[in-house]
């Protein structure tokens, strides 16, 4: 799960969080007015139609940034699966053909990178950019990406003007007073109202279950009898829901950096769990920075480095760096380090330059680029989808007292992300479109063994998620990368993990028991 937004002025967001909202009542015939049997029947109708229609593949539009020989197309799905003859939307898909011989080809491999709100259209570029980790899998599979409903080129939704969304500096997410909290709550209501005004017809149907149904329709349109799938982060939850709804449609499934699918965890508790995990991984990174004080000069101990963070944050609060980077923007940039080991050195370098008297690298890295129109549209859209899906997937606490108590308690021990994360999700407290009960993820008849990969100290999807999915999907195998914490580990160089993922995708074979791998290489300054 990726987050990058916090509230600032005029109902806009920033890197780190969202908030509260009162949305308009759903239109008649919204998703929850029907039973799941109706939706299952509608999904079967849609898949049958898609299988007959196929996909009209063509060169990708120039502004999609997808080079030949990648091809693009669309798959038509119902907005509301309970009404398969009602309003339709189009799901954008792309593919690159398997690079091996016809005898080597095993079908299509679909991919979701997470979010909710992430686009998977760049997945085929792992072939055009010659990603060695995936080279052998690419011989056997067409690599297929897609924009989930509401994302990118698939009936995109929006909540606010993209320029306003990225504009900074935003308000400090850590409140100093009850007045600060009230201001954030009001901004949340404005944001949620914007979602309803701009995208109200889509919101009741922006659920993980509907995205899983879309995935099955795409499978059918590709002419595939069964799904081969790789999901990362939120993509693991999408895969878990798909595997529960369509167990006998799964051929191979790899899930990497796992959302805890326990229905009591979706989604309020999941976000509280992140606050704790981010603090732990931030400490790992700061310890690494201290170990390399000869390169960064930010302190020789964790305590000294952490104090530098406190000092930097206070300086940005007093006067935003370059007039653009306040505490919220700093959190948005610095959270990259707990997310990804590949960002340990870049974040430390920008911070080190600031401490040495050159603030520009940090400003350039953390401030919004208002000239990046396409990027800002994508950022706002991704945040809108994140909010819509998490709010529609499950019931959320409606009492501000509970939100306030839980986040005040956590902030005392885990201050890095707690309040930023709270504001990110607070719109769900008053989201008035239909809310469903989360899917009870379980092993259904016909589900083959699933491969699960997880690092021990992942901040965005804590390790317990992989353990829970392993329990829920009988016969699955868990690869644990010990003493590591990067998010999304199947695309990192670690032969222990890479070889097992490749063997599974190519042969379907798994180890006889769960596996522990040594960590991938530690970053160097």
Image (cartoon, rainbow, N blue to C red):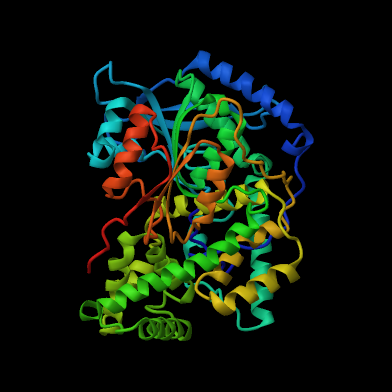
Is 434 rendered above or below residue 282? Answer: above
Is 57 rendered above or below residue 348? Answer: above
Task: Say which of 189 and 230 sits in front.
Answer: 230
Give x and y (percent) for residue 313.
44, 81
Task: Say which of 500 and 265 sits in front.
Answer: 500
Point 73% across, 68% down: residue: 402
Quick check: 97 left or right of 176? Answer: left
Quadrant housing residue 518: bottom left
Residue furthest to the front in view is 512
Give x and y (percent) for residue 487.
41, 55
Give x and y (percent) for residue 384.
56, 51
Point 68% across, 52% down: residue: 264
Please indicate, yes or no, whether residue 473 appears anywhere in the rendered image: yes
Could you tell me which quadrant the C terminus lies in? bottom left
Point 53% across, 48% down: residue: 116
Give x and y (percent) for residue 207.
63, 42
Quick check: 122 left or right of 460? Answer: left
């Amino acid at each position: 799960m990726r987050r990058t937004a916090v509230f600032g002025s005029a109902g806009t967001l920033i890197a780190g969080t969202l908030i509260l909202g009162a949305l308009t009542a759903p239109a008649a015939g919204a998703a929850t007015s029907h039973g799941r049997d109706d939706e299952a029947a509608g999904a079967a109708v849609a898949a049958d139609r898609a299988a007959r229609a196929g996909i009209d593949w063509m060169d990708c539009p120039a502004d999609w940034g997808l080079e030949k020989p990648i091809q693009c197309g669309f798959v038509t799905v119902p907005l509301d699966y309970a009404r398969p003859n009602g309003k339709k939307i189009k799901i954008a898909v792309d593919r690159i053909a398997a690079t091996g011989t016809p005898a080597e080809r095993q079908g299509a491999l679909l991919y979701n990178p997470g979010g909710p709100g992430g686009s998977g259209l760049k997945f085929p570029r792992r072939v055009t950019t010659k990603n060695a980790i995936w080279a052998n899998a690419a011989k056997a599979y067409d690599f297929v990406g897609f924009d989930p409903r509401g994302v990118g080129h698939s009936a995109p939704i929006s909540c606010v003007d993209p320029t306003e969304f990225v504009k900074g500096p935003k308000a400090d997410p850590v409140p100093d007073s009850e007045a600060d909290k009230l201001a954030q709550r009001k901004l949340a209501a404005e944001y949620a109202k914007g979602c309803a005004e701009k995208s109200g017809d889509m919101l009741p149907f922006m659920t993980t279950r509907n995205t899983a149904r879309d995935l099955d329709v795409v499978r059918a349109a590709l002419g595939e009898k069964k799904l081969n799938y790789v999901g990362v982060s939120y993509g693991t939850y999408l895969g878990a829901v798909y595997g529960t709804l369509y167990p006998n449609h799964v051929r191979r499934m790899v899930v990497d950096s796992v959302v805890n699918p326990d229905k009591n965890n979706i989604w309020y508790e999941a976000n509280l769990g992140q606050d704790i995990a981010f603090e732990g991984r931030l400490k790992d990174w700061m310890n690494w920075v201290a170990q390399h004080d000869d390169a960064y000069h930010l302190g020789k101990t964790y305590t000294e480095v952490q104090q530098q963070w406190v000092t930097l944050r206070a300086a940005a609060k007093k006067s935003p760096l370059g007039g653009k980077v306040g505490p919220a923007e700093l959190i948005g940039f610095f959270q990259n380090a707990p997310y990804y080991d590949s960002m340990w050195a870049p974040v430390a370098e920008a911070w080190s330059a600031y401490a040495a008297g050159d603030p520009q690298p940090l400003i350039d890295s953390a401030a919004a680029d208002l000239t990046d129109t396409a990027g800002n549209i994508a950022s706002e859209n991704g945040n809108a989808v994140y909010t819509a899906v998490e709010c529609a997937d499950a019931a959320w606490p409606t009492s501000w007292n509970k939100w306030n108590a839980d986040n005040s308690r956590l902030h005392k021990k885990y201050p890095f992300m707690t309040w930023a994360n709270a504001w990110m999700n607070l719109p769900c407290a008053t989201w008035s479109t239909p809310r469903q009960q989360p899917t009870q993820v379980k092993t259904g008849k016909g589900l083959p063994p699933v491969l699960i990969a997880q690092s021990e100290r992942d901040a965005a999807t804590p390790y317990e998620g992989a353990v829970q999915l392993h329990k829920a999907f009988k016969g699955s195998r868990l690869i644990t990368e010990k003493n590591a914490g990067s998010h999304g580990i199947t695309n990192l160089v670690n032969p222990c993990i890479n070889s097992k993922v490749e063997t599974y995708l190519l042969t379907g074979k798994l180890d006889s028991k769960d596996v522990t791998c040594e960590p991938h290489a530690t970053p160097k300054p």
